[in-house]
Amino acid sequence: MRRLAVCVGFMNEAYRRQIDRTAADSGFSAVYFDTEAALEKEIDRFEVVFGHPAPALLRKAEKLRWLCSDFAGVEKYLDDSVWPHPDCLLSNGSGAYGPTISEHIIMVLLMLLRRMPEYLDGLSRREWPYFAPIRSIVGSHVVMLGTGDIGSHTARRLKALGAKVTGVCRSGRSDEPAFDAVLPVSALDEVLPIADALVMALPATPGTANILSRSRIALLPPRAYVVNVGRGGAIDQDALVEALGAGRLAGAALDVMTPEPLPGGHPLWSCPNTILTPHVSGNMSLGLTCNLDVDMFCGDLARYAAGELPVHLVDRQKGY
């Protein structure tokens, strides 16, 4: 019997039964671990691991042929040196996070448009403020940098609320009909000056590092908001702080930043009209995310057992 290790923090009995059924049908025996320390003692026994073990632990997995990360971000696994064998497969949880992260994006964007940071500041002092005008998603032009699962889910919700949505990605193509247009990254500079909001949902790759550079921040109009749910390294953070402080941007909502956790004295804490959240737009706090993650793993496990590649396979050279 082939062996499968499961080490994810959201496991429950229903998920165990679902995985056990799929494993049995696929010729696998599943073993569950509550902690990474427990997994470390036996990781060399398993052909497949479902979870996100530390790279140092992964090197000990002598029989490993496939790691299915329950997380979408897999940058810590891109270095060939972390793998016990060069032909090991890597897949991720991209596809499970679209609903929860897109809802987070809509939440913070509405908060910015309706001036909630200003209201919360006044109410914290027990004042009774009134701010006008406020702005609406209706008629806004949102540039969505990243058109994958998260970008597509967000585009659908924005479109339903009356926004125009322009997607920007490497290929300049997307099958998602909610995008009014999809452009290649080479056209990003052309759309930034006409954006009411720039939403960033990018993985951490060499090509996305500092993609919102100082020069590109300067292209955004003063009415624009920046929302980032991808990785903090995609933004020139110092330049963003300067632009927010000088009023050259209307505000920002950052769920990711550099470093994390953000030090107490960091200038981002005091930027005007800025919403900071501690990397919580995704995670496993929404039950639907966990359901989707297990469904995706079970589907890919059946394919893997049949000699097929996982649907959610990651190209370690590209980083996604």
Image (spheres, rainbow, N blue to C red):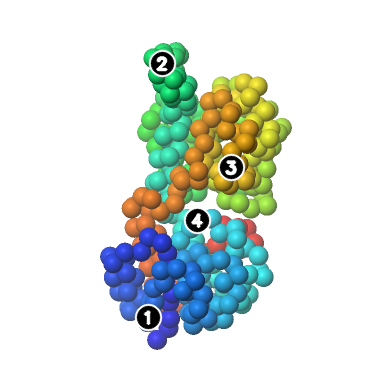
CA distance for labels 1 and 2: 61 Å
Q: Which residue is mark 1?
A: 29
Q: Is residue 194 visible?
A: no
The quarter of the picture where residue 256 lies is top right
Secondary structure under the numbered disc 4 in the rendered image: loop
Q: Residue at x 39, y 77 (%)?
A: 31
- Name the residue beneath numbered marker 2: 127
Q: Looking at the image, is mark 3 or mark 1 nearer the viewer?
A: 3
Earlier-in-chain disc, 3 versus 1: 1
x then y, percent, for residue 61: 55, 77
Sequence-earlier tag: 4 or 2: 4
Tag 1: amino acid: Ser
Q: Residues within 10 Å of mark 1 (few under 14, many from 20)?
A: some
Q: Position of residue 266 (x, y in %)?
A: 63, 36
Calculate the distance from the C-alpha at mark 4 to the C-alpha at mark 3. Answer: 22 Å
Distance Cα–Cα, label 3 vs label 1: 42 Å
Badge 1 or badge 4: first in the primary sequence: 1
Task: Say whether residue 106 is left or right of residue 59.
Answer: left
**Viewer-nearest of labels 4 and 3?**
3
The image shows residue 253 at horizontal and vertical percentages of 52, 34
Neighbor class of circle 4 (other Cα within 10 Å; few <14, some 14-19, many 20+) is: many
Indicate whether 270 appears above or below 21. Answer: above
- Type of the residue with mark 4: Ala
Gap between marks 4 and 2, in whole Å?
Answer: 42 Å
Residue tagged 4: 72
Corner quadrant of residue 105? top left
Image point (60%, 41%), residue name: 263
Q: Within 10 angstroms of label 2, few (less than 14), some, or many (20 or more) residues? A: few
Q: Vertical placement of 156 versus 207: above or below? A: above
Measure the alpha-carbon separation of dots 2 and 3: 29 Å
